[in-house]
Amino acid sequence: MDTQPRLILLHKHKTSGRVRFLCLPYGVVAFKALPALAALRDEDWSPKIQIHPAAIVREAEVRLGLPEDAIDPEGDFQAWVDTPGGDVPVLLGAFAGIDPPFGAAERVGARFIAITESRALTDVERQLLRRAYEHVLG
């Protein structure tokens, strides 16, 4: 049963407001793809346990070779995905720098995409991006 939390990583430019998502070779949910039968739960659905993204954000910084505090956890965002193995929390982290860390993305075979470039992603990933996008734009 693989119900470990996943993470969406984004960068919102402080001046222009441009939002870009880190897209890994297998999709936008770090650091393991969601199973094929995954389905996004309604926004109103919530388990009894809430998970804060601080620990998984730190793990992401290490995996990407970034310094501590390079990613800000978005503690008030949480989405849940129903999978055959159980419910999986999807958390959100935002890169703190002025520009996205392009070098870190390149080292792991990733790139930054706008939400308009998400056509090749799975339906559940596109829905997750929409929720994350709406969250950061308020």
Image (cartoon, rainbow, N blue to C red):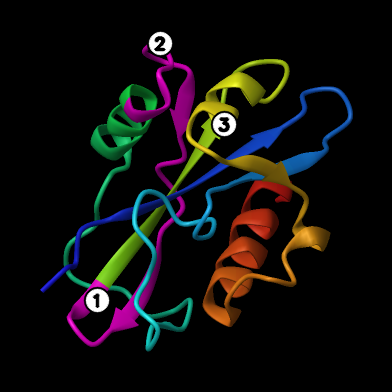
Task: Choose top left, top right, bottom left or bottom right for residue 6.
Answer: bottom left
Task: Choose top left, top right, bottom left or bottom right for residue 96.
Answer: top right
- Residue 76: x and y in percent read 44, 48
Query: Which residue is disc 2 drawn over?
Result: 67
Q: Secondary structure at mark 3?
A: helix
Out of 95 and 62, give the one closest to the viewer.
62
Q: Residue at x 46, y 40 (%)?
A: 74
Q: Would residue 27 appear left or right of 86 to someone viewing this image? A: right
- Residue 84: x and y in percent read 23, 87
What's drawn in magenta, residue-wise? 63-87
Query: Which residue is disc 3 drawn over?
Result: 105
Q: Secondary structure at mark 2?
A: loop
Quick one: which residue is furthest to the top in this view?
67
In this rendering, the answer to whether 80 lies above or below 55 is below
- Quadrant location of the N terminus in the rendered image: bottom left
Q: Would residue 29 appear left or right of 134 to someone viewing this image? A: left
Q: Nearer the viewer, mark 3 or mark 2?
A: 3
Quick one: which residue is furthest to the right in this view?
16
Question: Of label 1 and label 2, which has the lower sequence position?
Answer: 2
Q: Residues within 10 Å of mark 3 (few under 14, many from 20)?
A: some
Task: Name the amino acid type tagged 2.
Answer: Pro
Task: Name the amino acid type tagged 3.
Answer: Ala
Residue 7 inside the magenta-drawn segment: no
Query: Which residue is disc 1 drawn over?
Result: 87
